[in-house]
Image (cartoon, grey):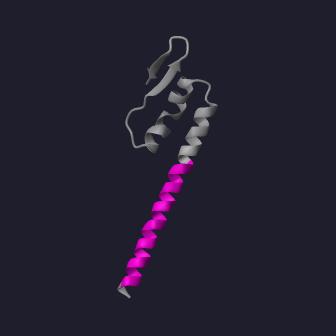
Amino acid sequence: MCALLRKKEVEGKRERTLEEELEFQKKLNYITNKIHSARDTDDILLNLQSEILSLFDADRITIYVVDGIRKQIVSRF
């Protein structure tokens, strides 16, 4: 009986973990689509910053942009 309860507990934890992973993937997919449809990096910083920070539990964001003319990487924050 005890082994059966442990098995159900493990299955419940696994199910919650999968649900959390699915929710994360949905949010990541949403943000990725928004990034791809953004007009420029300012659009990303203004409209998606809080969602990106929340998704990754971060307090800051930096976007690196490739400057094709100068052949440099530029940081936007």
Q: Is residue 77 above or below residue 23?
A: above
Q: Nearer the viewer, residue 58 or 64?
A: 64
> With 39 as the anchor, is 9 left or right in this view?
left
**Quarter-wise, where is residue 39 in the image?**
top right
Q: Position of residue 22 (x, y in %)?
A: 53, 55
Q: Nearer the viewer, residue 69 or 19?
A: 69
**Residue sitting at the far bottom:** 1
- Tell me which residue sits at (51%, 21%) in the image: 66
**Residue sitting at the far top:** 70
Quadrant, the N terminus: bottom left
Q: Is residue 10 above or below residue 55?
A: below
Q: Is residue 31 above or below residue 45?
A: below
Total marks shown come to 0
Q: Position of residue 7 (x, y in %)?
A: 42, 78
Q: Position of residue 17 (x, y in %)?
A: 45, 61
Q: Which residues are magenta?
A: 3-26
- Tell me which residue sits at (46%, 19%) in the image: 74
Quadrant, the C terminus: top left
Q: Is residue 30 above or below residue 76?
A: below
- Tell me which residue sits at (39%, 81%) in the image: 5
- Magenta stretch: dominant SS? helix
**Quarter-wise, where is residue 10 in the image?**
bottom left
**Residue sitting at the far front:** 71
- Tell me which residue sits at (43%, 28%) in the image: 62
**Residue sitting at the far left:** 2
Does the magenta run of residues contain 4?
yes
> With 59 as the anchor, is 73 left or right in this view?
right
Does the magenta run of residues contain 13?
yes
Q: Position of residue 51 (x, y in %)?
A: 49, 40
